[in-house]
Amino acid sequence: MKIVVILLICLAVFTVLYLLMIMPRMTGKPDTVPFKEWLYAHRGLHDNASDAPENSMRAFQKAVDAGYGIELDIQMTKDHVPVVFHDFTLKRICGAEGKVCDYTYEELQQFRLCDSDQTIPKFEDVLKCVDGKVPLIVELKIEATDTSICPAGDKLLSEYKGMYCIESFNPLGVFWYRRHRKEIVRGQLSDAFIKEGEYVGALYFLLQNLLFNWLGKPDFVAYNCKYPQMLSRRLCRGLYRNTAAAWTIKSQEQLEAAKEHFDIYIFDSFIPD
């Protein structure tokens, strides 16, 4: 009997601890409703086989012209210029060796995006292009513990007049905004990392299950749309009434299915009806 009681107490403690760890921001929350009124073009309205590849100025202009919000990625160059680029390495998009942070901004201009005439843009220039016409979801690309993109990107965003929010896979980026810019809508990105098979280990188990939410206290959780049933994600939306964003939706069928589980939709590879 004592063993059963001990086990029940342990289960109760574990459950409370788990719920506290995944708890998003509950008080003093900024309004996320305006962000739910848009569809978001993933890395701009792009086609990597066209003259408007991902995270290019042309793809962003196309999204603005079509009236879509934009999801984009920012990271730092060697000379501390915030640029818009997704991968840490240049290989996939530019066919070059090394990382973005290995080059100065001027050096990066020698590379072309997906064999187009487009080059890696400055974040500052993208903000000028969008000019508040559509909302932005800005993903902070943070490798390990280097959060230098946070203050650098925020310096530009603090002068920007348009609607935007930030998100990151790295909880340290979300935490930076919790500490320094409480009024900005912030989101925790995640995926079923272990289910996908690309990553293994305790860290990715914690990230997959949103067990760093206690650190960043996100206003929304952005999750891989293929895994709406992940328990922590469902509890954040259902129990805590946290806004849920879906990435990356690649068909009208996926979009319709996502509407049952998510509130914000980031799309790619098709034009929504």
Image (spheres, rainbow, N blue to C red):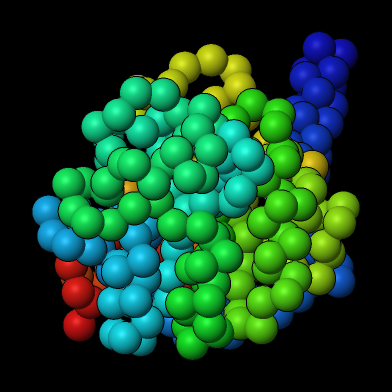
Left or right of 136? Residue 121 is left
Residue 238 at x, y percent in the picture? 59, 62
The image shows residue 150 at horizontal and vertical percentages of 71, 49
Going 28% across and 57% down the picture, which residue do you hit? Answer: 118
Q: Quadrant of residue 156?
A: bottom right
Looking at the rendered image, the quarter that the C terminus falls into is bottom left
Asked if residue 201 is positioned above or below residue 212 in the image, the reply reads above
Q: Report the side of 272 relative to 214 (left or right).
A: left
Is residue 253 in sight in this rendering? no
Q: Is residue 30 visible?
A: yes
Looking at the image, how many numbered discs can be counted on the residues?
0
Q: Quadrant of residue 77?
A: top right
Seen as rendered, the residue at the extreme left is 49
Q: In the image shown, does 227 or 164 lie closer to the viewer?
A: 164
> Measuring 61% from the left and 73% from the top, which residue is drawn there?
164
Where does the image place residue 247, in percent across and percent down from the top left? 39, 56
Residue at 67% x, 56% y: name it: 153
133 over 185 or under it: above or below: below
Task: Describe residue 211's horizontal placement relative to residue 90 as left or right.
Answer: right
Relative vertical location of residue 236 with respect to residue 20 in this rendering, above or below: below
Q: Nearer the viewer, residue 18 or 49?
A: 49
Relative to 173, is 30 above or below?
Answer: below
Residue extending farthest top: 3
Rendered residue at 12%/54% (across/down) = 49
Across and down, in percent, residue 15 comes to 74, 36
Q: Quadrant of the N terminus?
A: top right
